[in-house]
Amino acid sequence: MLKIKNLIKVFYPGTVNETKAINGIDLHIEKGDVVSLIGSNGSGKSTLFNLISGTFPVTSGQIILDGSDVTNMSEYKRAMLIGRVFQDPTKGTSPTMSIEDNLIVSSKKGMRGLNFSLYKKGAREQFNSMLDKIGLGGRLKDNVGLLSGGQRQALTLLMTMQSNPKLLLLDEHTAALDPQAADRIMQMTEDIIKTHSLTCMMITHNMQFAIGFGNRLIMMNGGKVILDVKGEEKKSLTVPKLISFFKSRGGEEFSDDAALLTD
Ligand SMILES: Nc1ncnc2c1ncn2[C@@H]1O[C@H](COP(=O)(O)OP(=O)(O)OP(=O)(O)O)[C@@H](O)[C@H]1O
Ligand SMILES: [Mg+2]
């Protein structure tokens, strides 16, 4: 599904600010894999997503998505194949537009060449039933700026699904939410992944979420993958085990590991 071959990303090469953010990653994410991606601040998690999505060009290496080499494909074209949700609830939606108009814009992304006004009529009912499921039933005409952070992330997830992405990349998409909203969004994320049989990678600093989510867990440090576990091995993970492994591999602090350890 997603093959990453000897990927390297150097920011500001040849200057005093040179940073090797991705330092030789080989990874094969299989169709249907649901991956938690963890690692300390600056370990290269978001950069990996930015390279997969085409936000930044790679320094070297190859990215193959669903059999096609997308290494040099524009970010715009890749956005048809990849759905992304970020930490900041204000990033995925436009606050001055209504919920309906936001949904229309995201639907259009996946519909090249179709007469959109024809589609729009049937879409309203579909949008309303989707909104019902996330507690926003009947609010199509409300401006998105009125919604809470959790509601906006829920809407962003729905919008992301409008273009039928092959791959969903979640970059700490619950980190800015209160615990209840974060739990709701995690539940919704899992439902969406199941319903659409998605392949997904989720970056999180919450190791409990990371352990509970999906079938595979990957840990990065210093721009490299230092742990990649699946199936039963993943099920047997605990937060203390993860932290001691991380430290044994020379990792420093996870940003919130102390808090999680005292739970
Ligand atoms: N656009 C950029 N320009 C220059 N350097 C960058 C850029 N983006 C990331 N970096 C650098 O690359 C390294 C990896 O950063 P990245 O954002 O991928 O880490 P991360 O694992 O997502 O961290 P966090 O958990 O804090 O989000 C860091 O040293 C960072 O400063
Ligand atoms: Mg990041």
Image (spheres, helix red, strand yellow):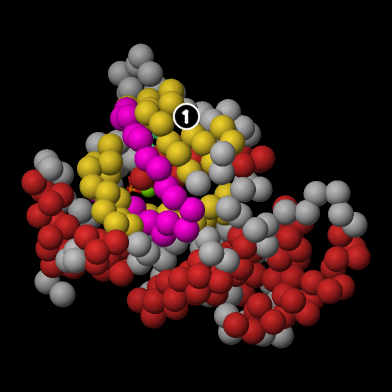
Q: Looking at the image, is 42 positioned above or below residue 61?
A: below
The answer to whether mark 1 is within 8 Å of ligand 1 is no
Residue at 35% x, 66% y: name it.
213
Q: Looking at the image, is 12 positioned above or below residue 36?
A: above
Q: Looking at the image, is 1 positioned above or below residue 33?
A: above
The image quadrant that residue 151 belongs to is: bottom right
Report whether 175 appears left or right of 232.
right
Residue at 28% x, 37% y: name it.
224
The residue at the far top in this view is 14
**Span highlighted in magenta in the image:** 20-40
Residue 86 appears in the rendering? no
Residue 69 appears in the rendering? yes
Say how many tags the image has.
1
- The x and y percentages for residue 95 are 64, 64
Which quadrant of the figure contains the C terminus?
bottom left
Label 1 amino acid?
Answer: Gln
- The x and y percentages for residue 28 are 40, 43
Q: Looking at the image, is 137 positioned above or below residue 32?
A: below
Report whether 6 appears left or right of 170.
left
Q: Secondary structure at mark 1?
A: strand
List the residue tagged with mark 1. 62
Query: Is residue 211 on the magenta stretch?
Result: no
Query: Is residue 25 on the magenta stretch?
Result: yes
- The x and y percentages for residue 91 are 55, 56
Residue at 58% x, 28% y: name it.
72
Main secondary structure of the magenta stretch: strand
